[in-house]
Amino acid sequence: MPPSYALERLLSAGGTKTVAGVDEVGRGAWAGPVAVCAVVTDLSEPPAGLTDSKMLSPARRASMVAEITGWAAGIGYGEASHEEIDELGMTEALRRAARRALAELPVRPDAVILDGKHDYLGAPWPVRCEIKGDLSCVSVAAASVIAKVRRDAYMASLGLADYGFADNAGYPSPVHQKALAELGPTEHHRLSWSYLDDLPRWRHLKRHRNPLAGEGQLGLFG
């Protein structure tokens, strides 16, 4: 079933004038920023085939961006760098990226539909968390596509072919893991993450921060 406007209309019926759908990408990557996109629509017919970005091929995602850009009433995009992730933890990094995305919208939304079950945004926006919102909600699906395409393009632009960023966007693919073991982390890697615990040659580079500032991450081999 394609995403619908059911949730946007439900919020509008309760008096909410402008609703933004928000989604993130890059949370589980080992390198690069975390990215958040916010999309506002006028409840018009969305582009045909719009759905969660993970359900679309790279070519279809790329063509969908142009369709979304011409259709959406507003699009905002924000990032938080790998340095911010290391210093502040993922929750605060997501919050900063989301606030940057919302600040780019042409109008301030009265409510936000946030993909997932955790509200990393918080006040002053009223937030409705929606599990699998990128599959069920039009504005969130649109945000997922924009966020994925823009972050992937940035990661590819870094080069670093040995790490395969053009294909894995900083996520832990076999190529990426092999390069890390042999060459060590680059200036774009998140150095507070526990994959470094599995790399004896490079473990000394790990950054330590307040463990209450963020969540633990998966190691390299488990």
Image (cartoon, grey):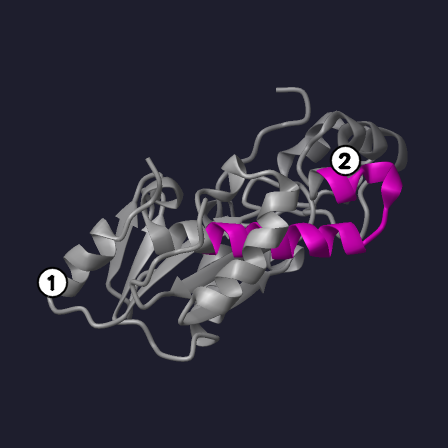
Region in magenta: 143-167
One can see residue 130 in this view? yes
* Residue 177 located left or right of residue 133: right
Number of numbered tags placed on the structure image: 2
Q: Quadrant of the N terminus?
A: top left
Question: How crowded is the residue under tag 1: few (<14 C-alpha within 10 Å), some, or many (20+)?
Answer: few
Quadrant of the rendered structure where residue 121 is? bottom left
Asked if residue 92 is among those painted magenta in the image, a careful observer would answer no
The residue labelled by disc 1 is: 13
Secondary structure type for disc 2: helix
Residue 156: x, y in percent? 76, 50
Residue 215: x, y in percent? 48, 41
The residue labelled by disc 2 is: 203
Q: Relative to 57, is 41 above or below?
A: below
* Residue 44 located left or right of residue 59: left
Camera-nearest residue between 186 and 139? 139
Q: Residue sitting at 68 percent across and 26 percent down? A: 220
Q: Residue sitting at 71 percent across and 56 percent down? A: 154
